[in-house]
């Protein structure tokens, strides 16, 4: 059954995700609200990696908000591409962190699907860090995360959340194309 908490969390997160795709600084404060609500929802569903992820999102949203508004030299950060070098170490590091965190959850908690849940956590962190720096490639990682998250959330009975993550998957594709165009036109 879809409860009020799941609806409220999804409204906040949906607003943030749509605003991020549109390159709006308002993505950050709406994300903080949605993440706080999702933290409670995921705790109730024994998805502990997702609870930790929401805490990370809250902190990174504050930092991202400042970075997007002030950049590195006092002006707004431009949309750019991540370097091949940074992506070449991010992916294997993400796989290793997923395995390590998944093992911790598997052996020390009653977590549901600890390795899959850990993949959502780790690659969401990667995507969020790239989003904070306005890197186009963040959207490729969000596509990966959403692909894994949809069946995970559905398996826990979080059907509204699973449906919206499927919508976020589409949003990530559209946003990736939009950000690529914005990166080409950046000064």
Image (cartoon, rainbow, N blue to C red):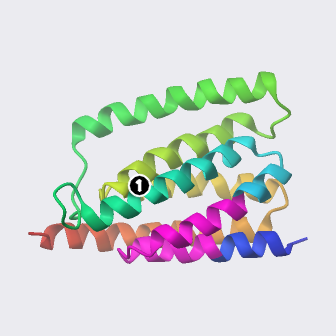
State which quarter of the image contains the C terminus.
bottom left
Magenta stretch in the rendered image: 12-38
Residue 136 in magenta stretch: no
Mark 1 burial class by Cα count in 10 Å: few <14, some 14-19, many 20+: some
Q: Is residue 45 left or right of residue 165?
A: right
Residue 164 vs residue 63, the one in the foreground:
63
Residue sitting at x 44%, y 51%:
127
Which residue is outermost to the right? 1
Q: In which quarter of the view is residue 149 placed? A: bottom right
What residue sits 22% from the left and 72% below the top? 182
Q: Residue at the spot x=23%, y=54% of the render? A: 81
Above or below, comparing residue 78 to residue 11 in the picture? above
Q: In the displayed orientation, state which residue is furthest to the front.
A: 74
| Residue at the image position 20 percent from the left and 64 percent from the top | 78
| Secondary structure of residue under mark 1 | helix
Task: From the viewer's perspective, tell me whether residue 134 is left or right of residue 110.
Answer: left
Q: Is residue 112 placed above or below 155 in the rendered structure? A: above
Residue 94 image point, x, y percent: 48, 34
| Residue 48 in view of the camera | yes
The quadrant the N terminus occupies is bottom right
**Residue 50 percent across, percent down from the top left:** 68, 48
Residue 153: x and y in percent read 74, 57
With respect to residue 127, does 29 lie above or below? below
Occupied quadrant, residue 57: bottom right
Residue pointed to by mark 1: 63
The majority secondary structure of the magenta stretch comes to helix
Q: Nearer the viewer, residue 14 or 69?
A: 69
Residue 12 x %, y %: 62, 74
How many labels were placed on the picture? 1
Residue farthest along the left direction in this orientation:
187
User: Does residue 39 appear left or right of residue 136 in this picture?
Assistant: right
Q: Do we see residue 165 in this rendering?
A: no
């Amino acid at each position: 059954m879809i409860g009020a908490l799941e609806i409220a969390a999804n409204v906040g997160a949906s607003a943030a995700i749509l605003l991020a795709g549109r390159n709006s600084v308002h993505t950050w404060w709406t994300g903080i609200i949605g993440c706080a609500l999702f933290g409670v929802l995921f705790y109730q569903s024994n998805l502990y990696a997702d609870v930790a992820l929401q805490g990370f999102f809250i902190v990174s949203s504050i930092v991202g908000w400042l970075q997007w508004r002030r950049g590195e030299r006092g002006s707004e950060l431009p949309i750019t591409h991540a370097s091949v070098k940074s992506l070449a170490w991010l992916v294997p590091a993400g796989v290793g962190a997923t395995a390590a965190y998944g093992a911790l959850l598997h052996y020390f908690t009653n977590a549901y699907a600890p390795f899959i849940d850990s993949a959502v956590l780790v690659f969401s962190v990667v995507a969020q860090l790239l989003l904070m720096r306005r890197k186009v490639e963040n959207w490729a990682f969000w596509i990966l995360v959403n692909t894994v998250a949809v069946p995970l959330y559905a398996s826990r009975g979080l059907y509204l959340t699973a449906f919206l993550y499927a919508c976020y998957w589409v949003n990530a594709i559209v946003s990736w194309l939009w950000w690529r165009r914005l990166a080409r036109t950046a000064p």
